[in-house]
Image: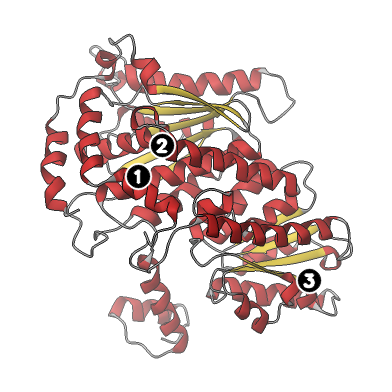
Amino acid sequence: MAATATAPLWTALESLPRPALTELFADPGRLDRYATVLDLPGGPIRFDWSKTHLSADVEAVLGQIAEAVDLEGSREALFAGALINNTEGRAATHMAERGVGNPAAAEEAERFHERMQALVEAIHEGLLGEVKSLIHIGIGGSALGPALAIDALAREDAKVAVHVVSNVDGAALAAAVAKCDPATTLIAVASKTFTTTETLMNAISALDWLREGGVEDPFGRVVALTAAPDKAVAWGVDETRVLPFAETVGGRYSLWSSIGFPIAMALGWDGFAAFLAGAAAIDHHFLEAQLAENVVIRAAFADLYYTQARHCSSRAVFAYDERLALLPSYLQQLEMESNGKRVLADGTPLTRPSAPVTWGGVGTDAQHAVFQLLHQGTHLIPVDFLAVGIPGHDFDPAHHRTLLANCFAQGAALMAGKAGGDDMARDYPGDRPSATILCDELGAATLGSLIAFHEHRTFVSAMMLGINPFDQFGVELGKAIAKSIEAGDAQFDPSTTALLAAAGIDG
């Protein structure tokens, strides 16, 4: 739908009264309306959006926008496998990797999963020799998702120690190989196109490391994870160790596909299957729940209210669980690469703000670093808190009680504030929004649910604004210029030319 048709509704959203959060809580039914517990495969998750400025008035206007842009139709098109990625002429079938949505896509994903399961179980059974370590090489979506899942779920009792390498800086690969024995290490090369410069450069260096470590056939230790299996075979990987996935699965949505191979290697196939099941449960909730009860749509509505009506340029995410330390980084790519756009899906300019800057940190560490700005700075920054009821350690339970007390106290303080009297340096204005996601425990299914929740939340925001969240052309220009530097066939501005000369790079 043309942006001009929804412009009056966005203006109406900006013009609504702005009662304080404490006023909104005068409604005795507020908590029941805005805090929802979903019974999911990994255990219950509480989604509490009551300390945001959502209200019946705000939801009514956003509901009108959703109707005007046919949000429900877009949701159905996504799951049906329609060509919703219009700029690239593709569907977006990551839900099919979880067994949900388009039947043909789900059937193909199941076949690919069966192939991956057979290889994973063969490795665990020792059919490829002793394997103690896996170096997983990828970048962007091919690395962030596996790194998050492995850090969250496989800190102890991993079937295989997995080391994720993404940065082309050789120091990253050096740190990984220092922890491994070439004789007992496999290399996973993850690239959708199997042309990614950084990934292939790291892969070649990893092969050199294997060769120098006495491995006679380094390519015999490589598993390729790609949507371009022919290119992987041409590169040198045996077809039996190429794990394909569909071209319609985007990079930042790909950890459910064969890109999840290192997750299955660390957890075992049952753990990876639980990961998929947790995500599938959110798929069904998003697809089937009515707007008023849909936790995904509610979260997206709050995001849109703050970016579009309150002009908030960033959103913060703080995980009060060390195992979720990489979640803010994962969400940065998911949200900013998906929705950091300046044109609509039809190619016309986007005249409203797009995605906010996603940033964040971990638990009490962040309190002593950035919460000063959140409580008393001049920026209004919506905050998401994530917490887990059952700790991931066996130390004194006081550790976890203190951790959770701090998490919940921060949300309460942001909302309530505190008057400083004559001492304005100690004045807390309050009325600062936050949402809290509280999981019962952190297992594979729960993590799958959390990630799928954020995927669909990002999709809803995109559809409401009229943008395509499934392309990422913005990452290509700098990479193309870097290649021209390597080729030495481009002219640059004086600053870039001087930097190249100072670094000893011919440009």
Whether the residues at callouts 1 and 2 have beta carbons within 8 Å, the answer is yes
Q: Of helix, strand and loop, which one carries label 2? A: helix
Query: Horizontal placement of 405 versus 64: left or right?
Result: right
Residue pointed to by mark 3: 221
Q: Residue at x 36, y 56 (%)?
A: 469
Residue 141: in sight, yes or no?
yes
In space, the residues marked 3 and 1 are separated at their CA atoms by 42 Å
- The residue lying furthest to the front in this view is 103
Location of residue 85 in the rendering, given as x and y in whole percent from the top left corner: 37, 62
Whether the residues at callouts 2 and 3 have beta carbons within 8 Å, the answer is no
Residue pointed to by mark 1: 460
Are there few (<14), some (14-19), or many (20+) residues within 10 Å of tag 3? Answer: many
Location of residue 38 in the rendering, given as x and y in whole percent from the top left corner: 51, 27
Residue 475 shows which numbered tag?
none
Are there few (<14), some (14-19), or many (20+) residues within 10 Å of tag 2? Answer: many
Q: Residue at x 68, y 46 (%)?
A: 273
Relative to 323, say whether 21 is above or below: above
Residue pointed to by mark 2: 296
Relative to 119, say whether 463 is above or below: above
Query: Horizontal placement of 286 versus 303: left or right?
Result: right
Location of residue 502 in the rendering, given as x and y in whole percent from the top left corner: 43, 78
At label 3, the amino acid type is Arg
Front one among 444 and 288: 288
Front one among 75 and 214: 75
For the C terminus, give its image quadrant.
bottom left
Dot 3 or dot 1: first in sequence order is 3
Front one among 440 and 417: 440
